[in-house]
Amino acid sequence: MAVVQKVRRKANQSKPPPTPKTLNPSSGHSPMAAVRVILPHPHLPIPSWRPQLKPSSSYPRRAVAAPASLSPSPLTASLQLGDVIEAQQFDRQVLNEIFEVAREMEAVERGSHGFRSRVLEGYLMATLFYEPSTRTRLSFEAAMRRLGGEVLTTENAREFSSAAKGETLEDTIRTVEGYSDIIVLRHFESGAARRAAATAEIPVINAGDGPGQHPTQALLDVYTIKREIGRLDGIKLGLVGDLANGRTVRSLAYLIAKYQNIKIYFVSPDVVKMKDDIKEYLTSQGVEWEESSDLLDVASRCDVIYQTRIQKERFGERIDHYEAARGKYIVDKKVLGVLPKHAVIMHPLPRLDEITVDVDSDPRAAYFRQAKNGLYIRMALLKLLLVGH
């Protein structure tokens, strides 16, 4: 059976990869988990013993035979990821395992104040951010350090890297992968993460690619819904704000469609309505959706209100469109008044004025807990990508 392997360094390079660390026997890990294997792309045979990860691109990878020693029974198979590019690549079995590891990471983070984890000791993560970020960049860097790894970072790669001199993304990736074991990329162009993954022989994580996708945000969003509401099937979700340019709502729509009996309400100004490709995808997956202009009515029906910022940076010179959209839908005390007691308000942050500050003290305001969950999800992804479960 053929699988695809992303090799940290090319065979003709003399520098060996980091030696897998000896893990605590009580943790259930083995050194064999350090082998980095990803699943095949759609037209290659898929090993029956692995949970299926649906890769997001058709770029070829080098295929090698799977060692017999890496073929556990289906009941003990551990998740191995390759690149994290888009929300569609995950199935429910993979999501369940990511969330299971994230719960473990909550305990690791709590214990790290007295005992530093060494799970990723010897590994280096490079963060390449061509757009501004607070939560995503810092949570990835905190995640790596919480697990004992190190970080190479550039806060504004668009201005303070050789991209300012005209270097292509592909050349930058080929260079940076020589210094690191995994790359976390945020870029202003949709599809940039896919290009980077096609170039690199080490794992690439999409930390947001323009108006395209933000898969790790979607993972932490779904994880938050599970932790806050207690279930994922049967959720009624209201997506509010900039739905045309918001990569977070696009990725969340793709991911929540993996679950049963989902109903999604789209609430947005006309100039930033959800695009047809998402609506068509949801319909193809049997997900019921509805557009509404009445936020109070939608809030009274939902388990989750997911508010987003109107993104001025996506409007270019059409400032008139931005001004027409801004401030139309605001989550305030009136919304809280009709929101069910069990429901939560989420937001990928940063916010401007679309959630009033007096909402913060309500226990249904989950957005800062949501941001903290980003640390656990990203710790889980780094662990799974680099050393396995």
Image (cartoon, rainbow, N blue to C red):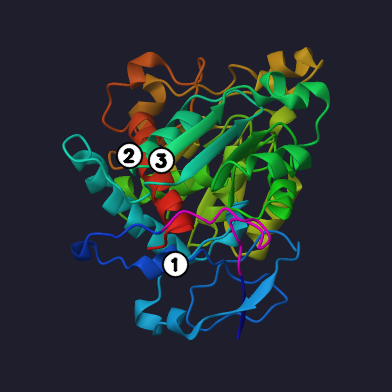
Task: Give the magenta range.
Answer: 5-19
SS under mark 3? helix
Mark 3 touches mark 2? (CB < 8 Å)? yes
Prevailing secondary structure class for the magenta stretch in the rendered image:
loop
The answer to whether residue 309 is seen in the rendering is: yes
Q: Residue 17: within the magenta? A: yes
Can you give x and y, in whole percent of width and height, for residue 296 in the image? 47, 31
Count neighbours of disc 3 (C-alpha within 10 A) and say few if under 14, some if 14 to 19, many if 20 or more: many
Image quarter of the N terminus: bottom right
Count neighbours of disc 2 (C-alpha within 10 A) and say few if under 14, some if 14 to 19, many if 20 or more: many
SS under mark 1? loop
Q: Which residue is mark 2?
A: 146
User: Considering depth in this image, is 208 or 234 the residue closer to the camera?
Assistant: 208
Mark-to-mark CA distance, 3 and 2: 6 Å
Quarter occupied by residue 172: top right
In this picture, is 332 found above or below 18?
above
In this picture, is 23 found above or below 72?
above
Q: Which residue is mark 1?
A: 79
Between disc 1 and disc 3, the foreground one is: 3
Can you give x and y, in whole percent of width and height, for residue 323 in the image? 70, 13
